[in-house]
Image (tube, rainbow, N blue to C red):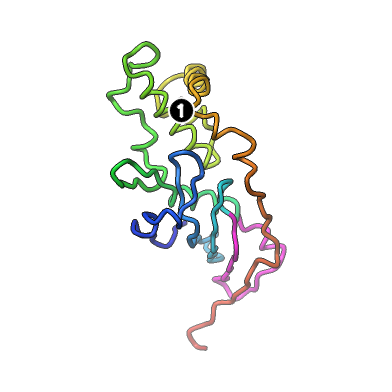
Amino acid sequence: MWTDPIADEFVRDQSNCVVLAPGINAPSRYVAHANIADEWEVEIDVRVHVLGPYAVRVTVVPRSGTGVTSESLRKVPIATILSDSLAQVIFVRFEGGRILWGSNPAVLIMPPDLRGQWPNGDRVQDVLEWTALVYRLASALGNGPTAAVARAAGVSRATAGRMVAACRDRGLLSEFETPQFNQRFEMREVTLEDITFMRRESQDD
């Protein structure tokens, strides 16, 4: 699965971006591609809002000579393609304009200088800000956020839960978790009318 290249210049214009959560950004539109079991090529025009990606148009190109039926179409994992493609184009915008693309392990692994700071070190606030970033990033990608914090910090699930609770106590997750934020847009289901069927023309044609 892959996406068309997205230039840094495109997302530096913030009008082209969607804030999925504080600090977590995505381009407002992109094109995702996938090969399904070597049977179909799938291209999806994707738009993104604060609740995640949705498909505007899906093109299915059979690799074999058979056509695409409604039954076979239902086997195309559109939701998985959308989620996996979002993981490739999501990015964190840092101070100074630096952009870090994708669910990069560098974002999801606790920096060495923060290890050992929880819960009584001098940089507890930095630990919690990092924890909130990982939590928001995992949530935006549809992953379990507390489990993601535990993996990234190398701590138990219980310890990660306490770190997340401390983030909430300090207001680092409150805006992200309010119903007003999460319900700002309604999800739109992809229907068969959204699908464009194409048949690959043979080279003889």
The kind of residue tagged 1 is Val
Relative to 63, is 161 above or below? above
| Residue 175 x/y as whole percent | 54, 33
| Residue 1 x/y as whole percent | 47, 56
> In terms of secondary structure, where does tag 1 sit?
helix
What residue occupies the far bottom of the structure in this picture? Answer: 205
Side of 112 relative to 124 (left or right): left
Is 163 or 147 nearer to us in this picture?
Answer: 163
**Part of the protein shown in magenta:** 54-77
Q: Which of the 4 image quadrants contains residue 153?
A: top left
Rendered residue at 49%/56% (across/down): 28
| Residue 5 x/y as whole percent | 38, 61
Which residue is the site of mark 1?
149
Is 12 inside the magenta-drawn segment? no
| Residue 151 x/y as whole percent | 44, 28
Is 30 or 94 nearer to us in this picture?
Answer: 94
Residue 157 in view of the camera: no
Relative to 137, is 27 above or below? below
Q: How many marks?
A: 1
Rendered residue at 31%/15% (across/down): 122
Is 68 or 142 nearer to us in this picture?
Answer: 142
What residue occupies the far top of the structure in this picture? Answer: 120
Residue 194 in view of the camera: yes
Relative to 46, is 160 above or below? above
